[in-house]
Image: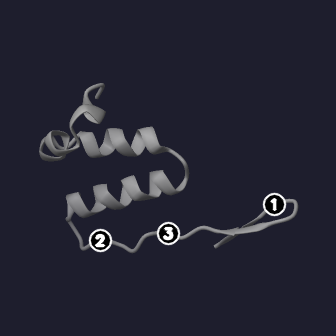
Amino acid sequence: MSITTACSTSSVVLPSSCPANNAKCQRNLDAQTLTYIGQHEAALQLMCSDPDLRDVIGEDCASW
């Protein structure tokens, strides 16, 4: 997919798909997609919703 604006063309790379019923894979791809579109806080919030990742990410998850 390409997005054309006034003087430039940007390609949007969509992540590959996950196996059926693989919630963690889908969560990771959703967070990656959110990051691609500039929604870094939303991606972090999504990743912090997993208790195991919240422990690893640490202080960045404190507000979630």
| Residue 39 relative to residue 2: left or right | left
Considering the numbered disc 2 on the image, is that residue within a helix, a strand or a loop? loop
Vertical order, 39 against 24 (above or below): above
State the CA–CA distance, disc 2 to disc 1. Answer: 31 Å
Q: Which residue sits at x=25%, y=32%?
A: 59
For residue 18, the mark is: 2
- Identify the residue under disc 3: 14
Vertical order, 50 against 30 (above or below): above
The quarter of the rendered structure image containing the C terminus is top left
Q: Residues within 10 Å of mark 1 (few under 14, many from 20)?
A: few
Q: Which residue sits at x=20%, y=65%?
A: 21
- The percent position of residue 36, horizontal first and vertical second, equals 51, 57
Q: Which kind of residue does numbered mark 2 sit on?
A: Cys
The quarter of the rendered structure image containing the N terminus is bottom right
Q: Residues within 10 Å of mark 2 (few under 14, many from 20)?
A: some
Q: Residue furthest top?
A: 63
| Residue 16 relative to residue 9: left or right | left
Question: Closer to the observer: label 2 or label 1?
Answer: 1
Q: Which kind of residue does numbered mark 3 sit on?
A: Leu
